[in-house]
Image (cartoon, helix red, strand yellow):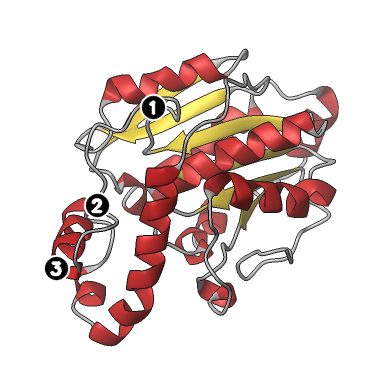
Amino acid sequence: MSFPFFNTSLRTGAALRLFCFPYAGGSAAIYQDWQQHAPNWLQICPVELPGRGRRCAENPAGSIPALAAAITSALYPYTNTPYALFGHSMGALIAFEVACGLEVAGRAQLRKLFVSGARAPFLARRKPPVGHLADPEFLAHVRDLNGTPTEVLANKELMDVLLPVLRADFALCEQYRMRGLQLLRAPITTLAGDEDEEIPAPDVQEWQRLTSGPFHSVRFPGDHFFIRHNEASIVDLIRDELSSGLNPVLSAAVGSRP
């Protein structure tokens, strides 16, 4: 698996890297504007998944654990310095599995796991699966989630490309089952929309059972795709949480950068 970043290269001067994982149907491009809101000491590293973006010729992953294992292996050489993980919806499940894999592999520089718009992975789904539905019903569900722009849904050529990726991603999420109960040593912060009807607040709070470290939960205005309208505020939150409680070496590096 090649190293799959979107339009970026790793900066040796960055004190901390944030690896970001997209939601179902999304590509690494959804994080392309985050760096402009971030301080210089924090590098935003969006991870491109198979089947989309620059990797559109590749087959989508067969399962979240298999995908996470491949990403863990690819990220391993880049996690010998402080790093954090962020994922929204499907990306939150991937980020959690990657966090577990990296901690097991001894990559203890993980500063925090940010999970956004996702219920705790050990909870049963509250709604029936939709990935198998006929196109009209499936697309109606996608439209109701409000994560895909109307102009994209109305563009047949674009949807011919996007629909197989969406179906594959929904299948990944619907088939995913957490394996055992692994506690992360790294802290977890959850992000959720205050009008998200897909992910109830109690299901988000259950993430606290998956860390032996501190837990923090934050709500933003919006529905399931609140991250599309709160980019600057989310990056500010990430900046504040990652810059607090750092070790002296990293604190000095952060303090020397605007």
Q: CA distance from mark 2 to mark 3?
A: 11 Å
Disc 3 is placed on an element classified as: helix
Q: Is residue 146 above or below residue 99?
A: below
Mark 1 and mark 2 lie on one chain; the one further toward the N terminus is: 2
Give percent across and percent down for residue 137: 14, 61
Residue 11 falls left or right of residue 67: right
Residue 149 vs 74, above or below: the answer is below
Residue annotated with mark 3: 136
Task: Identify residue type, mark 1.
Answer: Val
Q: Are marks 1 and 2 in contact (CB under 8 Å)?
A: no
Circle 1 sits on which residue? 218
Q: Position of residue 121 (x, y in %)?
A: 45, 30
The amino acid at mark 3 is Pro
* Residue drawn where x is 24% and y is 31% of the image: 126
Question: Between tags 1 and 2, which lies in front?
Answer: 2
Query: Which residue is at a point 53% across and 57% down the rendered structure image?
Result: 62
Q: Residues within 10 Å of mark 1 (few under 14, many from 20)?
A: some
- Residue type highlighted by circle 2: Val
Q: Is residue 84 visible?
A: yes
Reading the chain from its start, which is encountered first: label 2 or label 3?
2
Q: Is the residue 32 above or below the residue 79 in the image?
A: below
Distance from the alpha carbon under mark 1 to that under mark 2: 28 Å
In the rendered image, the vertical position of residue 62 relative to residue 248, given as above or below: below
Q: Is residue 235 visible?
A: no
The circle drawn on residue 130 is 2
The percent coordinates of residue 46 (x first, y second) are 59, 57
Task: Give the SS element for disc 2.
Answer: loop
Pick the quarter of the image with the N terminus. Answer: bottom right
Residue placed at 57% from the left, 56% from the top? 35
The x and y percentages for residue 51 are: 52, 70
